Image: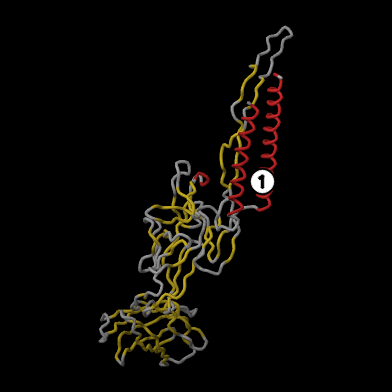
Amino acid sequence: MGVIHTALSALSSYDLMLQVTANNLANLNTPGFKSQSLHFLDTFYQTLQAPTVPIGGGQGGKNPIQVGMGVAFGAIITRMAQGTFTPTGMPTDMTIIGNGFFAVAKNGQILYTRDGAFRVDADGNLVHAGTGALLLGWVADEAGNINTSSDLQPIKVPVGGALAAKATTLVRFGGNLDTRLDVGSTQTLSFTVYDSQGNPHLVSLTFTKTAPNTWDWQAEFNGSPVGSGTVQFNDQGQWQSGTGTITLTLTNGAASPQTIQLDFSYLNQLASTTTASAVFQDGFPVGVLETLSVDARGIIIGSFSNGVTRPLAQVAVTVFSNPEGLERVGDNMFKASGNSGLPRYLPAGVGGAGRIQSSGLEQSNVDLARELTQVLIAQRSFQAAARTILAADEMTQEALNLRR
């Protein structure tokens, strides 16, 4: 009977092995799935004879005589190896290359996943495609600044929403003023600035050469002077000194007066055709979000119809001291456990957190050849244990026949 009970433990263990293997094969195409394997342990031993120590006089020691009572499973181990990256062409699909998990909020609970299939819902939230769980990270302020030391928030993008206009406060000029021009020569250019409501306004700027390496400038708006100053160049033709401001008086309801700083430090004065122009200004009109992209740091960047690109949020990558200790809860999700360690929320690529690759998903790390081999091993091991029970049953039958 002891043989039968020992073989029964093997049947139970190999049945569980086959269940684990079948689950791996069933999730062969599940994004972010991490395969599992069974770890067996031998069980209690019956000691028929205890070991003895050598006592001398020609009498040596003897080893213990023990009979095992079967097998049991000690652990189901999760293999956290990286799955293959598969491009999808969707910018909101993300893969963590390296350590870490996406953090999501579902029904008031924070869960973790390697499945980076995210979509934008009707409210602009980035949600897990399979469950609707909210992706967590850090949201940028109106200027595009992100504070990764703040608390996590659901990431929301203003799809179809407007980016408020910004009044111009700085205009930077670059290019060249021709040093070959005579004193008294003028060069005129125009540039566009925006008011607080996003309306464009044209400003005219005239440079007048007053001496070698010296140019005076005067700005006009609606035919009236709005600012003037002098720009000095060194003997190498590089900007040496001279900045200024202009003040616009507006009557269209936008904030007025509007003061704008002019930066001439990128201008040169060389023996070449004049190419001076405004190369940068920090204002812009109202814009609508058109496309999203995600960089390797997990920063979600929005491109607006007014030509502005701006960080909207940053995805948090969660790392654990023992990721194998996470508890599976289904839907490609894990939750923290007592043996996983506490979650640490980090920007991608920082402190051991993996980087993020967008427009693709991490596939299951199931090795098909290995799992099919495990199926055969489980099957043959189960058959061997069953045959042992059959042999023990026949022996029992023979013993019962002794009374005849």
**Which residue is rendered at x = 62% and y = 28% of the image?**
69
Quarter holding the N terminus is: top right
Residue 242 x %, y % = 38, 78
Q: Secondary structure at mark 1?
A: helix
**Observer-nearest of 111 and 73:** 73
**Which residue is rendered at x = 52% and y = 86% of the image?**
271
Can you say whether 9 is above or below 367 in the image?
A: above
Can you say whether 52 is above or below 141 in the image?
A: above
Quarter holding the C terminus is: top right
Residue 90 x %, y % = 52, 69
Residue 173 image-quadrant placement: bottom left
**Which residue is rendered at x = 65% and y = 28% of the image?**
3
* Left or right: 100 as drawn, with respect to 171: right
Q: Residues within 10 Å of mark 1 (few under 14, many from 20)?
A: some
Query: In the orientation shown, which residue stands out farthest toward the right?
Result: 58
Q: Amino acid at mark 1?
A: Gln
Residue 242 appears in the picture as rendered? no
How many discs mark residues in the rendered view? 1
Residue 255 appears in the picture as rendered? yes
Can you say whether 49 is above or below 139 in the image?
A: above
**Observer-nearest of 245 and 67:** 67
Q: Which residue is mark 1?
A: 374
Residue 75 image-quadrant placement: top right
**Observer-nearest of 252 and 156:** 156
Residue 174 x %, y % = 45, 81
Residue 335 x %, y % = 45, 49
Give the colour scheme shown. Answer: secondary structure
